[in-house]
Image (spheres, grey):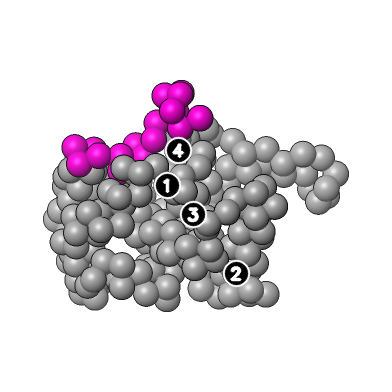
Amino acid sequence: MLQTDVFDVGYWSRNAERFERYLQRRTASWNSLIANEGAWFPDHLRELYEQTLAHLPRYWERYVEPRFRAKSNLTLVHGDAYFANFLSPKLPGADATYLLDWQSYGFDIGAYDLGNLCSTFWTPEQRHEDQREEKILRRYYRGLQAQGVKNYSWDDLLTDYKMGLIFWILMPVQDHFGRSNRKYWWPKMQCLVAAFEEWHCEDLLSI
């Protein structure tokens, strides 16, 4: 299916031109946020975001570009798979569950959806309660194994999850640029930053 051109492959990641557009867009969004919110925005978060943006080119060259050039371990993703886009029955198992809002789908790194699902609006306490985050990751990994996916280890999934967090941590910045209310993007940013720091995503960015 990766060869059919039915779906985009790595919309922002598939080549240097796309990545450069992505970096320019996120940088402009960040500059806008600081221009409008800098008076109160925490210094440690300003440093984290500036360092992340500064290291994105090297990160893309080292981790992302080879992956998309080889089209290795990619899958069809929803692109916006947080819980508000799931329509589930009130009684578990009473009917089917539907995933809505298929406007950002494409072939990408599967754990990008997991990063959105687990870290966009869950606080650390919610992620850790009853090992919720780990259970979701392990269930996803078991599903891959059950479907015959080989040469993809548990550590590979965890690395991809960190890559997903690196992608999503910049989304609240874009939300601000799109004129979302602070009541929306600021809690989202705090949840994502907490996950980013806890998973030591800076190690991939060489911060």
Dot 2: few (<14), some (14–19), or many (≥20) neighbours within 10 Å? some
N-term-proximal mark, 1 vs 2: 1
Residue occupied by mark 4: 107
Q: Amino acid at mark 1?
A: Ser
Mark 3 crowdedness (10 Å alpha carbons): few <14, some 14-19, many ≥20:
many
Discs 1, 4 touching: Cβ within 8 Å: no
Residue furthest right in the image: 94
- From mark 2 to mark 4, how far is it between C-alphas? 24 Å
Label 3 element class = helix
Task: Say which residue label 1 marks.
Answer: 72
Does 10 sit above or below residue 162?
above
Which amino acid is tagged 4? Answer: Phe
Q: Is residue 53 left or right of residue 121?
A: left
Q: Estimate the x, y position of residue 90 in percent, counting from the top left.
A: 79, 48
Q: Give the camera-side residue of 177 and 148.
A: 148
C-alpha separation, residue under disc 4 versus residue under disc 3 = 12 Å
For marks 3 and 1, the one nearer the N-term is 1
Q: Nearer the viewer, mark 3 or mark 1?
A: 1
Tell me the quadrant of the picture where the C terminus can be found.
bottom left
Establish if 85 lies above or below 7: below
Residue 134 is labelled as 2
Kindly identify which residue carries mark 3.
Answer: 111
| Residue in the picture at 59% in, 62% down | 137
Q: Which mark is residue 203?
A: none
